[in-house]
Image (cartoon, rainbow, N blue to C red):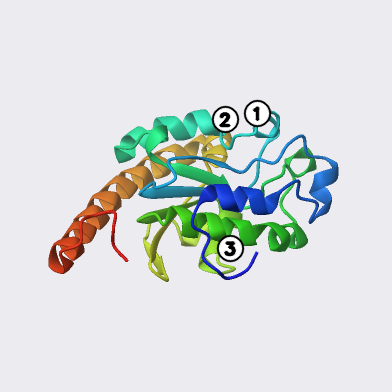
Amino acid sequence: MTDQNVSTLEQVRAAIGACRRCELCETRTTIVFGVGDPHAEVMFVGEAPGRQEDLGAEPFIGAAGKYLNQLLSRAGLTREEIYIANVLKCRPPNNRDPLPAEIEACTPFLREQVRAVDPLVLVTLGRFATQFILKTDVGIGNLRGRVHLTGRFSVLPIYHPAAAIYDRAKVPVMERDFELLGALVVRRREEASARAARSGTPLGNEE
């Protein structure tokens, strides 16, 4: 990919093609691109497809995805309103952690997805998504619960839903963070409306 603006998610998907840029192409069932509202106010970024996602070609349709759907209601959101993608588009064998070479090969497409959706809020789910988006080595436990600014994006790191499935002590933390997300979305909507009113530009047509 280049640094040129990509206007649609369809163009990003076409650029990926039948990707063979890393060794994950040898073990995947399918490329899991992303799904949701192409003009969503909130974009979620996860780590990588799991087994169900690899078979179904859609992110977050396994157990973690079902839990994510429940959490969205705490933010006043529905699955249909968001866009969701992963750092990696192919499943690592046995759901192992992404390797640096795989992240390097795949994330140019994630950057273009973010540019195409242009959300008000970017939610990073888990360590790998958070560290990539925020360009940091700090652990997510020290980053979650606070809004971070990177470029023009408000970024809210949250534990990956799978973490709360395996560690139920994280459930109240997850619920609070999704309530924080709801408040953040309301605030960003109000800010966007105020900017549009000052410029006389209808929402959705800001340069």
Q: Amino acid at mark 1?
A: Gly
User: Label 3 belongs to which residue?
Assistant: 132
| Horizontal and vertical percent position of residue 164 | 52, 38
Would residue 182 be visible to someone looking at this image?
yes
Task: Report whether residue 139 is seen.
Answer: no
Task: Give me the residue at 57% from left, 30% from top.
Answer: 61
Residue highlighted by disc 2: 61
Front residue of 142/189: it is: 189
Residue 146 found in image quarter: bottom left
Q: Position of residue 15 (x, y in %)?
A: 66, 54
For disc 1, the marked residue is 56
- Could you say which is closer to the camera, residue 68 or residue 103? 103
Which quarter of the image is occupied by the C terminus? bottom left
Question: Do labels 1 and 2 touch, CB within 8 Å?
Answer: yes
For the residues labelled 3 and 2, the Cα–Cα distance comes to: 23 Å
Query: Pointer 2: residues within 10 angstroms few (<14), some, or many (20+)?
Result: many
Which of the 4 image quarters holds residue 179?
A: top left
Where is 61 relative to 113, above or below? above
The secondary element bearing badge 2 is classed as: loop
Q: Which of the 4 image quadrants contains residue 201?
A: bottom left
Distance between mark 1 and mark 3 Cα atoms: 25 Å
Amino acid type indicated by mark 2: Ile
Helix, strand, or loop for circle 3?
helix
Query: Pointer 3 and pointer 2: residues touching (CB < 8 Å)?
Result: no
Q: The disc labelled 3 sits on which kind of residue?
A: Phe
